[in-house]
Amino acid sequence: MMDQQAYEALFGSFNHTKIGVVGDIMLDTYWWGSVDRISPEAPVPIVSLQRKETRVGGAANVALNLRALGAPTTLFAVIGKDTEGEELGRLLKAEGINTNYIHESDTRVTTNKVRVMGRNQQMMRLDHEHTNDISDIESEKLLANFYSYVDAEKPSLIILEDYNKGVLTKKVITAVIEYCNKKGIPTAVDPKQKNFLAYQGCTIFKPNLKEVKEGLKIEIPTINSESLTKVHEALQAYLQHAISFITLSEHGVYFGNKSTHKLIPTHIRNIADVSGAGDTVIAVASLTYASTSNMELAAELANIAGGLVCELVGTAPINKESLAAEVKKLLVK
């Protein structure tokens, strides 16, 4: 719980808390249409295209959530020199996200996930992407941009957002975390399986329950504070990180550090779509922690925010006013 003064100060502080996001950014394209007949050429529906829509995805959606809360946000990524990259840049700039440090590569394509929508459901998805690791030259360009930004802007926190598209190589992961630790800047990690245990020395490690089970190759038969504290200890044996922050779907969230551990139950919601909820959770938790250094408060806010965006259809960033109203109702005494 917090008082009214702390509540107002928190949401006000977001507007001047600088956050950098390093990771895989992508374009989400939606082709909407109607379906009235089956093709005479093959047993597939014919979608009569009516409109197209593009959105930002992956690490770019984390940045979008941060901007929705008012935080000055900068992206670090590698994309292709293509029309998809131009469209992605246009969408990001329109939201006020700093794209000056994104590296455009001659040898990669910008990840584009095209969803064909008919009868109010997804009929097909087409993925155009490169998922191999970025080259040494591309890594060096990305890291040079990152070092320049950190030295000039002195951000409050860096998020590493992995979607297994090749940007967060072991080299990039190690270099980013080491540089941040040298500069006294906390790091928050949203991992994927490929480099799950490569984030040694990070501040906040935020897997979901499935990722923890697969990454540590363990079963967690009972979801409670005691079992999850054992998971935190197992993670810490590999990573030597400060805080474990595990999202548990309908069970809520768990956080543990050297002195505190807590399982925070979810708030009852009318769930419409879980798409993008993880992006919202890492954004809200990271921004709150960067503003307060209070992980319990960060976990509480992220838990509320994740539930709110699950009430919306499709990937959508958190609404600052809606979050503030819900936090006031649930956490302000």
Image (cartoon, rainbow, N blue to C red):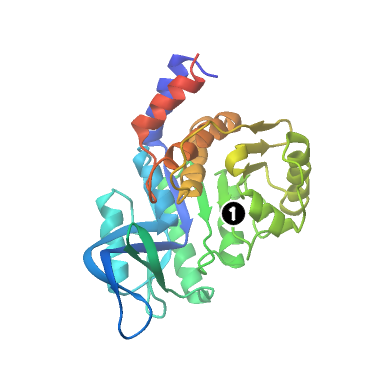
Viewer can see residue 144: yes
Q: Residue furthest left?
A: 50
* Residue 214 to residue 181: above or below: below
Q: Is residue 154 left or right of residue 261?
A: left
- Give 43 or 153, whichever is nearer the viewer: 43
Q: Is residue 222 left or right of residue 9?
A: right
Secondary-structure class at tag 1: helix
Q: Residues within 10 Å of mark 1 (few under 14, many from 20)?
A: many
Q: Residue at x 77, y 46 (%)?
A: 221
Identify the amino acid type marked 1: Ile
Residue for badge 1: 177
* Residue 113 to residue 261: above or below: below
Q: Position of residue 236 (x, y in %)?
A: 74, 47
Q: Position of residue 33 (x, y in %)?
A: 26, 64
- Give 12 or 277, whichever is nearer the viewer: 277
* Residue 243 to residue 133: above or below: above
Viewer can see residue 151: no
- Give 274 or 261, whichever is nearer the viewer: 274
Q: Residue at x 75, y 48 (%)?
A: 220
Q: Residue at x 35, y 57 (%)?
A: 56
